[in-house]
Amino acid sequence: MVTAVFPAAGSSKRMGGGVNKNLLELAGEPILLRTLKTFSKVERINFLIVAVAAHEVDTVEGLLRGAQGLKPWRVTVGGSERQYSIANGLKLLPDDARIVLVHDAARPLVTVQTINEVIDAAEQFGGAIAAIPEKNTIKVIDAEGFVRYTPPRAELVSVLTPQGFRREILLQAYDRAAEENFLGTDDSSLVERLGIRVKVVAGGYQNIKITTPEDIRIAETFLEA
Ligand code: CTP
Ligand code: MG
């Protein structure tokens, strides 16, 4: 079976307003609920783990208790970095979770198809991530703000979530990162350090991360389409 872990314990600084952006409404429904409902439509997923700030545990548990159509879930306390929030969530993995997905709560427009493709590829290859071809030219720069070089765009993708892994691979990657004090910006980067090849799956340009206030409007436009 598949368990999904949702980091939702950030401080939403770029959104502003002093509230957890994952609790803001998108077309009338909280972002976190939209995300969890989409994952709950995936048959193979049997458990959802949500990491939130300590002072939000009661609020979020209340929200989820009142919601229809959710797979069984647990809420836990997150950490000061996304990676630590996920590490806390992983402590609640049920024994029967063979594949673990990690998904930003703040990506409510993810599709069931993308989730299924990540699960399939994670089962086949050990690890898989949703990504989209990079539209911009990306430069590698130095500390003085000068261009060092330009990697060929055809070799670049922008990485999204979900990211999925066989249980033992992800747990080993998190253990290793903790031992070595490695802080990554996604889950795959922890797994890559084990020497495991991670498969890239088509992610969908609508699967944006709600980050700034404009993103709410952009996401609502996607929902209308
Ligand atoms: N997240 C988390 N724990 C943290 C930091 C982030 O669980 N310590 C979660 C966020 O709640 C979000 C996801 O990771 O669902 C992606 O992070 P991001 O978009 O950066 O959210 P925030 O960190 O909350 O936003 P900001 O960086 O603007 O403060
Ligand atoms: Mg952040």
Image (cartoon, grey):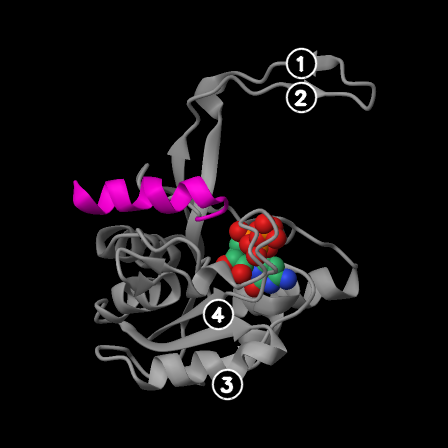
Q: Which residue is mark 4?
A: 167
Disc ID at residue 149: 1
Q: Which residue is mark 2?
A: 140
Identify which residue, 48 or 189, lies in the foreground: 48
- Mark 2 or mark 1, earlier in chain: 2
Q: Position of residue 206 (x, y in %)?
A: 31, 41
Disc ID at residue 169: none
Q: Residues within 10 Å of mark 4 (few under 14, many from 20)?
A: many
Quadrant for the C terminus in the image: top left
C-alpha distance separating marks 4 and 3: 29 Å
Q: Which residue is mark 3?
A: 58
SS at badge 1? strand
Q: Position of residue 197 (x, y in %)?
A: 51, 46
Taking 145 as reference, is 126 left or right?
A: left
Q: Is residue 22 magenta?
A: no
Residue 134 visible somewhere in the drawing: yes
C-alpha distance separating marks 1 and 4: 37 Å
Q: Is mark 2 within 8 Å of ligand 1?
A: no
> Residue sitting at 25 percent across and 53 percent down?
111
Most common SS among magenta residues: helix
SS at badge 2? strand
Q: Which residue type does callout 3 highlight?
A: Asp
> Residue sitting at 43 percent across and 84 percent down?
61
- Mark 4 or mark 3, earlier in chain: 3
Q: Which residues are magenta?
A: 210-225
Residue 35 placement: quadrant: bottom left
Q: Which residue type does callout 4 highlight?
A: Arg
